[in-house]
Amino acid sequence: MTFILRRSAIALVLAVVAMIAAVPSYAQAVTLSAISTDKASPQRAETGVTFTAEATGGATPLEYHFLYRNTSGPNWMEPRGWSADPSWAWAGQAGGTFEIKVSVRSVGHQITDATQTVTFVWEPWPAVTLSAISTDKASPQRAETGVTFTAEATGGATPLEYHFLYRNT
C-alpha cells in the first residue's frame, strides 16, 4: 500500500513536528530524587555537614532553595535565597533533630516544581564539670616564685582543653 501525501499534508506534519520541538525544556517535569549529605547523621553539634540536592528535568540551570527547622519548634529558617548551587553547608550550632527542606524549580519560574525534606541529628557535646583547681604551693608565696596550677575536670569529649586566666587584685 502506498500513501501519497499532498503538499498541505506534508506542511501540516512538518508544522506539528516543529511545534513539538519548540516545546520549552521547562515543560519537562522537575524531579528531586534525593538529598544527600557528606556525613551521616548523627553528628556532634557544630560539625559542618553539606546537603546536596539531586534533581533532573526542567529548564537549566535549576534553582534550589534550602530551609531548616528544629523539629521541636514550628519556625523554618532560610539560610539563603534561591540559587543555582544545589549544595548548602551548615553546622548545627545546638544539639537537636532538624528537618532540612529543599525546593527546586526551573530557572525563571516563580513557583516550586519539587520539594523534599530530610531529617538530620546533631548531638550536643557531653557536659564538662570542673571539679577542682589546685596548686603545687600553698598561698601566699613571695613574688617571682613559680606556682603550678592544675585543673581537674570530668565529662566532655576527650581530649579536654584548658584555658587559664589570672588577674592581679
Image: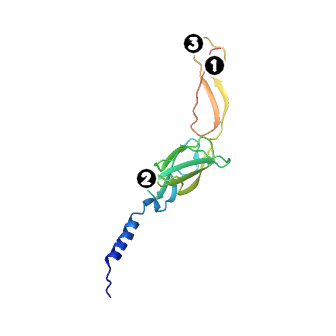
Residue 48 in sight in this render: no
Residue 153 in sight in this render: yes
Q: Nearer the viewer, residue 61 or 126?
A: 61
Q: Circle 3 — which element? A: loop
Image point 65% across, 26% down: which residue? 133
As measured in the structure, the alpha-carbon distance from the residue carrying label 1 to the one carrying label 3 is: 13 Å
Q: Eyeballing the image, is 47 above or below 35?
A: above
Residue 79 lies in what quarter of the image?
Answer: top right
Which amino acid type is marked by label 1?
Lys
Q: Eyeballing the image, is 69 above or below 136?
A: below
Q: Nearer the viewer, residue 98 or 134?
A: 98
Q: Residue furthest front?
A: 8
Residue with the mark numbered 1: 137
Lower position in the chain sequence, tag 2 or tag 1: 2
Answer with left or right where residue 57 lies relative to residue 141.
Answer: left
Percent x, y for residue 105? 50, 54
As measured in the structure, the alpha-carbon distance from the residue carrying label 2 to the one carrying label 1 is: 69 Å
Q: Residue furthest top?
A: 142
